[in-house]
Image (cartoon, rainbow, N blue to C red):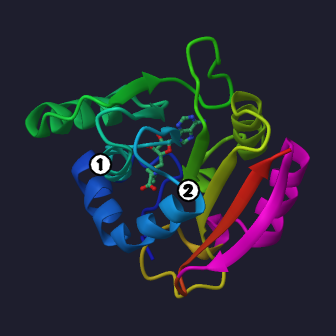
Amino acid sequence: MEASYQKDLSHLTWDEVFARQLLRASLVEGWMEALHLQLGACVLDIGAGPGYVSLVLADRVGPDGLVYAVDRSADALAYLARLQHERRVSQIKRIVADATTLDSDELRPDSALVAMVLHHADDPMGILTNVARLLPTGAPAVVGEFHPEGPCEKGPPRAERVSPEQVQAWSVAAGFAVLAYCRQTQEHFMFTLQRC
Ligand SMILES: C[S@@+](CC[C@H](N)C(=O)[O-])C[C@H]1O[C@@H](n2cnc3c(N)ncnc32)[C@H](O)[C@@H]1O
């Protein structure tokens, strides 16, 4: 557990957040499978942070696909911009925005990932409601979170974690059907959702 944990991540540098994303790298394949992510797909990465997961998603969707990396932190997305430049990855569009109010005019996502974000959010239900609004009917979405009964060796302290029951209730109220629940590790769980 992190003694100085701050919900807004101000206790960590973006280098440190990126390093923590790397520690969770094994979770990403399960998220992409649940999203049926293929070449040419267009996926929302909500709360992308410094972008490790966005880069993996970009690799999966290929040069004809698109990843919308959305984060309220301009600094986090500047970190991702540097990595995109170094690695010559153009199929990620970075959007500095609050996910509760992100608008849909220019976005045509066919799936959405909301991973390790809700416990940082001021309005987690608002995020899920807006993500549902941005997706077409039938589209898949994945929510990943830290389990409150996990060992809590890394990540948010137990008291800051959201329960699977809470995520399920928010998801259904936001307009999703729950297709599957999975405890990916002792520390992590995920829901596979479908936009109703
Ligand atoms: C732990 S970090 C990155 C998580 C990343 N999705 C992953 O799986 O590794 C969580 C990010 O969510 C962002 N975030 C929290 N609330 C948000 C909101 N309402 N809108 C957009 N981004 C938000 C934070 O700025 C932070 O960069």
39 left or right of 193 in image? left
- In the rendered image, the quadrant that contains the N terminus is bottom left
Judge whether 65 appears above or below 57 on screen. above
- CA separation, marks 2 and 1? 14 Å
Quadrant assignment, res 158: bottom right
Q: Residue at x 58, y 50 (%)?
A: 114
Q: Earlier in the sequence, mark 2 or mark 1?
A: 2
Residue assigned mark 2: 36
Pointer 1: residues within 10 angstroms few (<14), some, or many (20+)?
some
> Looking at the picture, how far across and down is residue 175, in whole percent?
86, 43
Residue type, label 1:
Asp
Judge whether 108 appears above or below 49 on screen. above
Point out the stretch of residues depicted in magenta: 159-184
> Looking at the picture, how far across and down is residue 150, in whole percent?
58, 85
Residue assigned mark 1: 59
Q: Residue at x 88, y 53 (%)?
A: 172
